[in-house]
Amino acid sequence: MDYLKTVVPSQLMAERGANLVVINPGSANVRIGFASQDVPFNIPHCIARHITQRKDDTPTLSVRDKVMLNCHATPSQNAERERAYDIIASLLKIPFLDEEMPSANQALPPKMGRVDALSSQQNKDDSKFTWTDVMDRKRPVDKDADVDPLQRSTPDDTEPNSEENMYKEIIFGEDALKIPPSESYCLSHPIRRGHFNISQDYSLHQVLEDLRTIWNWILTEKLHINPRDRHLYSAILVLGETFDNREIKEMLSIVLCDLGFSTAVIHQEALAAAFGNGLSTSCVVNIGAQVTQVVCVEDGVALPHTALALPYGGDDISRCLLWVQRRHHTWPNFQTDPVNKPIDMLMLNKLKESYSQIRSGSFDAVSVVHSYEHERSVGHQKAKLSALNVPPMGLLYPRVLVPEEYPPPPRSWFQDYDDMLEDTWQTSDSLYSSGNGGFGMWDNYPMFPTRLKKFDNIGLVEAIVGGTASTAGLAPVLEQRVLNTIPSNQPIEKAEVLQSRSYPLFVPWKGGVILGVLDIGRDAWIHREDWAKNGVHIGSGRKYRDSYFLQAQAMREAA
């Protein structure tokens, strides 16, 4: 303890963080890095495998998620979305859907904000991507290297040193998202909406194999940790609150048994995010790509009864951006399909990050929209994007977002007799979502041990009292709206959205670094030998429960 009082924080990080690897897996991206690093590697959480086609088949990119996603809304859903749009339009004082928008060549009204993507300050074209080269060009071994030159093959034969083109068997990360649609690959996302992406077409075994392969590739190629040396390292898993107890157990097995780490510990994202911002008490709102999690932390302990899961995130805002432009007839005549063409989703995410923000008054922008309809060629067109402040308002009015539907996972998924939880949290059936949200198929099964309350159509204001987010303009809106919802008899005069002390995307990862380096939960660490031998029982004989149990235990010991 005396050493901890005198040591410089950077020195402590360097000493204890060199052999600590922090893994923060999400639905869209996985963040992995040494605890001694300032920021982790942030890599799309996906993998593409080459498929051998039959001669009579046409090569094509296969996306597993397109058999699960149903983005073709019914007329009633479209009508409901348009009503939500009109509510947002009245609040932001912008034209309704049935009102005429100014043309691209018309001067903008004085009260209309404008961001010109072609101005001198924003001339960088971030939404243009190039197709991934799927060929693995290797030189075959010269079998005649030790043979007399006169006895080698004749010039008419194939040159032994000629370059041989072969398909890459596996492609990872962003390169996997930019594979041309005409290539024979199967793109998979092992995690979707905060859960394992299990379906009739994506088995649990394949999901786990893909997770292991992706993480092993990052550890080897990015962190340069040889598999033979993994026993010298420990892993910190920073997991979202949506993961089921069995999913947590499977990821622990991957880290300890498959990847070969010596020890591992679990920390939950909400607690890690609070520590990452130097707070012990806060309401943490984690807006991810596909799910938003709300958890309150008090005195260093996450409160399970406050946990909420909202089935929408940044990807939904991006798809809403496309829907808004099409309804306003401002999107070019491109076959933009973010479900079946992942590269289109990359483009939409870039446009959203560059231009969407919450502000009052009409807010348009002139940008270059790219088309990825044809293989090896990328077209583009200058376009005026309208009502750019509507999509992020979907965080407050989620009915404007495009719904998704998922089929239920195989029933065998629920037959997990080696349960990690002794006291599984249960919520009332009336709180379950009813089919349109990303969690509908999970909650309709009574065998599923629900830990979080899940809601489809409530916004952030109804879900939180306080919070944080990186969406431009969201903080003041939340502060005012949350304050307005607090009863007048409560002695609360101010609601403040705290700004992140570091890049918001990496706050949970950084908090996991702090928790691991401080070593306050040594008794909660799980050793590979104990896990392989005893399963859910750790070396001390106590039954391993879940991350909430570990955090409460660690905080008590620290106190």
Image: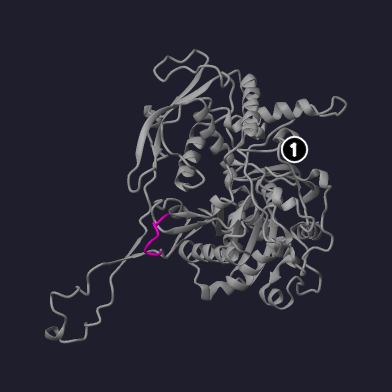
Q: Position of residue 549 (x, y in %)?
A: 79, 59
Mark 1 is surrounded, within 10 Å at the Cα level, by few (under 14), some (14 to 19) or many (20 or more) other residues, namely many
The image quadrant that residue 125 belongs to is top left
Q: Position of residue 327 (x, y in %)?
A: 52, 27
Reply above or below: 1 against 26. below
Look at label 1 and name its amino acid.
Ala
Reply above or below: 79 against 347. above
Residue in the image at 28% along x and 74% along y:
140
Specify whether residue 417 is in view.
Answer: yes
Reply above or below: 160 against 264. below
Residue that protrudes farthest toward the top in the picture: 110
Residue 277 is inside the magenta segment: no
The image quadrant that residue 512 belongs to is bottom right
**Which quadrant does the N terminus fall into?**
bottom right
Secondary structure beneath dot 1 equals helix
Q: Which residue is mark 1?
A: 463
Which stretch appears magenta?
Answer: 54-60
Residue that protrudes farthest toward the right in the picture: 489
Q: Position of residue 489 (x, y in %)?
A: 88, 26
Residue in the image at 33% along x and 48% along y:
376
Residue placed most toward the observer, 1 or 372: 372
Q: Position of residue 190 (x, y in %)?
A: 58, 58
Q: How many marks?
A: 1
